[in-house]
Image: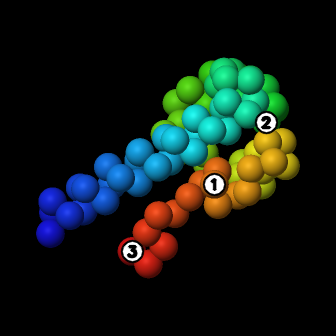
Amino acid sequence: MAKDTAKLKRERAAINAAALDAVTMRLGGDRSKLGRALGISRATPSTWSEVPQKYVRRLSELTGLPPEQILPDPYPYH
């Protein structure tokens, strides 16, 4: 069971990292530009492993990406 949980966590991390990369590319390919676009410290997004939920709607508006692509939940029933 622990192996399954660890595998799910790795898969989720990979999916969220890809989503964060997609958002970053839409905003110019630099995480500091992501911070600037959100009006937060330019360094803050470099610490993220996924987009915090409170920024999903704004990033969707800025990038044209649907919210579920910005913060995907690959295991909605777990």
User: Which-is-in-front pick, marks 1 and 2?
Assistant: 1
For marks 3 and 2, the one nearer the N-term is 2
Q: Position of residue 49 (x, y in %)?
A: 49, 39
- Label 2 neighbour load within 10 Å: few <14, some 14-19, many 20+: some
Q: Which residue is drawn at 56% across and 26% down?
A: 46
Q: Please name the residue that numbered disc 1 is placed on.
A: 69
Give the label on residue 19, or none. none
User: Which-is-in-front pick, marks 3 and 2?
Assistant: 3
Q: Position of residue 50 (x, y in %)?
A: 54, 44
Q: Are marks 1 and 3 in contact (CB under 8 Å)?
A: no
Q: Which amino acid does label 3 sit on?
A: His
Residue lying furthest bottom: 77
Q: Please name the residue that numbered disc 3 is placed on.
A: 78
Residue lying furthest right: 61
Q: Do the residues labelled 1 and 2 touch (CB within 8 Å)?
A: no
- Mark 3, secondary structure of its residue: loop
26 and 56: which one is in front? 26
Q: Position of residue 58 (x, y in %)?
A: 80, 48
Q: Which residue is drawn at 58% across and 35% down?
A: 21
User: Which-is-in-front pick, marks 1 and 3?
Assistant: 1
51 and 60: which one is in front? 60
Q: Is residue 58 above or below residue 44?
A: below
- Label 3 neighbour load within 10 Å: few <14, some 14-19, many 20+: few
Alpha-carbon span between mark 1 and mark 3: 19 Å
